[in-house]
Image: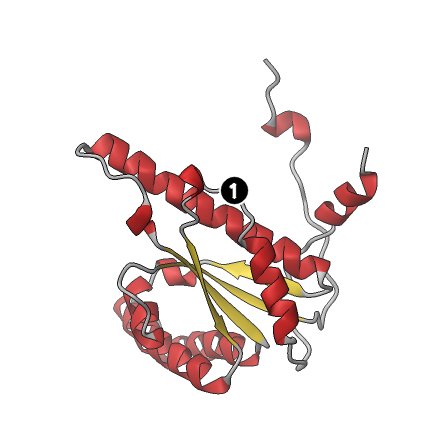
Amino acid sequence: MPTNLHGFLRSRRSIRRFKPVPVNVDVLTRMLETAAHAPSAHNRQPWRFVVLTQPQPKTRLSDFLGAEFRRDLTADGLPDAEIESRIQRSRNRIMVSPVVIILCMDASEMDVYPDEKRSNAERTMAIQSVSAAGLQLQLAAHAEGLASVWTCGPLFSPVTVRAALDLPESWEPQAMFFIGYAAEEPKEKELKPVDEVVRFL
């Protein structure tokens, strides 16, 4: 039994603060190749990765998202000071992270059905496939001694993310990963007991 591998898998944690150290492109390429080995429905591999390491695309993304975030928070009736604080925190996360990866889904090669039931199931399969690649990406980063955190902001602003980065229309932003060398110690996770989440039949 490969207990050392189980220990490795269980040791991954979400990290939100990174050292100002760039990540070598060879390391990133290796991670992405590993992520692309994830299982996918019909082996259609609907994942797409957008890798940001330079200030210009990060600035453009943070500017576009900041404008939409401001509109949403204003509509929620939040005070101006809190709105600006939240926008600045969001911007800092993008700009300070050595690597930002936008995980997208391209469902254009998935099966097509005439009815809504099967169409919805096919879309769910594509989302599940992309999610598997996202986890594989995080584990690949962990294997390289890197830390990461998975965030879901792009789900709230897919059109804005696509416009900011000039992505193809078929690329649907699903998640945003911040990746780098950890500048903080991971926190212990509270896990539900296995017998609460498993049923043997």
Vertical relation: 8 (above or below) 195: below
Q: Position of residue 152 (x, y in %)?
A: 44, 58
Give the residue displayed 56% in from the left and 54% down from the top: 35
Outermost residue on the bottom side: it is: 56
Give the residue displayed 29% in from the left and 73% down from the top: 163
- The quadrant of the picture occupied by the N terminus is top right
- Report whether residue 73 is seen: no
- Left or right: where does residue 39 sit relative to residue 198? left
The amino acid pointed to by label 1 is: Pro
- Left or right: where does residue 43 sit relative to residue 158? right
Identify the residue position indicated by label 1 in the image: 39
- The quadrant of the picture occupied by the C terminus is top right
Q: Residue 9 or 33: which is nearer the viewer?
A: 33
Location of residue 87 (image quadrant): bottom left
The type of colouring in the image is secondary structure
Vertical relation: 69 (above or below) 134: below
Tell me the SS state at disc 1.
loop
Q: Position of residue 196 (x, y in %)?
A: 62, 27
Vertical relation: 108 (above or below) 22: above
Q: Position of residue 95 (x, y in %)?
A: 51, 81
